[in-house]
Image: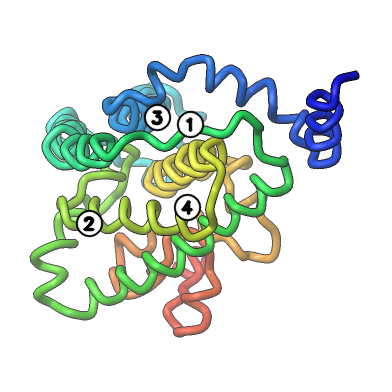
Amino acid sequence: MSSHNASELPILCSSGQLLLQPLWDRVRAREALTQSPLFAVLFSITTYVGFCLPFVVLDVLCPWVPALRRYKIHPDFSPTARQLLPCLGQTLYQHVVFVLPLTLLHWARGPAPWPREAPELLQLARHVVGCLLLFDAEFFAWHVLHHKVPWLYRTFHKMHHQNAASFALATQYMSAWELFSLGFFDMVNVTLLQCHPLTVLVFHVLNIWLSVEDHSGYDFPWSTHRLVPFGWYGGVRHHDLHHSQFNCNFAPYFTHWDKLLGTLRSAHAK
């Protein structure tokens, strides 16, 4: 065995990277796409719309399939086309007008070379959880501030609360400032933790899914808050209560910050 191969094999085996290496090799094989200045926008939009579409289909079927109504938080509410289309249009508009130019500016600096090795599975999991916890704390502070200061609420956050009963496509119905803030938190966190590019992709997919699920209006037996023990995770009913009462449950995902500041309200005590 050559000295080059002998040095590579222990690195891969000792770090557990072999579990993720095939996936990372497939991602790197599409480098022409992933290094494109359009990739970030296309990835964000397709992931978001792809997660929203199943819930849109459920909303269409719900009036005709009574079994679905048992899982719907507001059984008598179904979003209309006049509610769905502006939400979808706002998402597309903001990604083209705001996200794309910022992506082009970042790309113009020169894309960073991607490592050949995949991250270790446990390292990926630690970084994803770390990014979620940091994002949860950052948005909690942002959210409380934009509810407590009337000018900030009216100018930047009120748009997101225009739909009293939330639905999936309303997840990103927000002002440009709010969208920029969320993107800034994401970028800071993955940079601070020095996340591997594959970890960044996994975090973005999970973050988008959790946001859509929180606004979906459906509480299934497999919903995330039912899988995380000890009431650590709020979930869809937790966030729906924020949309209906405004003064509670400010954290997007976890419950510890609302507990500490006394703003946690149980959905079961609604």
Per the image, label 2 sits on a secondary structure element best described as helix
- Compute the Cα span from label 1 to label 2: 32 Å
Give the amino acid type for the residue marked by disc 1 in the picture: Leu
Residue at the (56%, 42%) spot, across then down: 196
Q: Nearer the viewer, mark 4 or mark 1?
A: 4
- Mark sitting on residue 178: 2
Per the image, label 3 sits on a secondary structure element best described as helix
- Identify residue for label 4: 190
Q: Nearer the viewer, mark 1 or mark 3?
A: 3
- Compute the Cα span from label 1 to label 3: 24 Å
- Identify residue for label 3: 47
- Tag 4–tag 1 contact (CB < 8 Å): no
- Identify residue for label 1: 68
- Tag 4–tag 2 contact (CB < 8 Å): no
Q: Earlier in the sequence, mark 1 or mark 3?
A: 3
Please state which of residues 48 and 41 is positioned toward the viewer in this rendering: 41
Q: Earlier in the sequence, mark 2 or mark 3?
A: 3
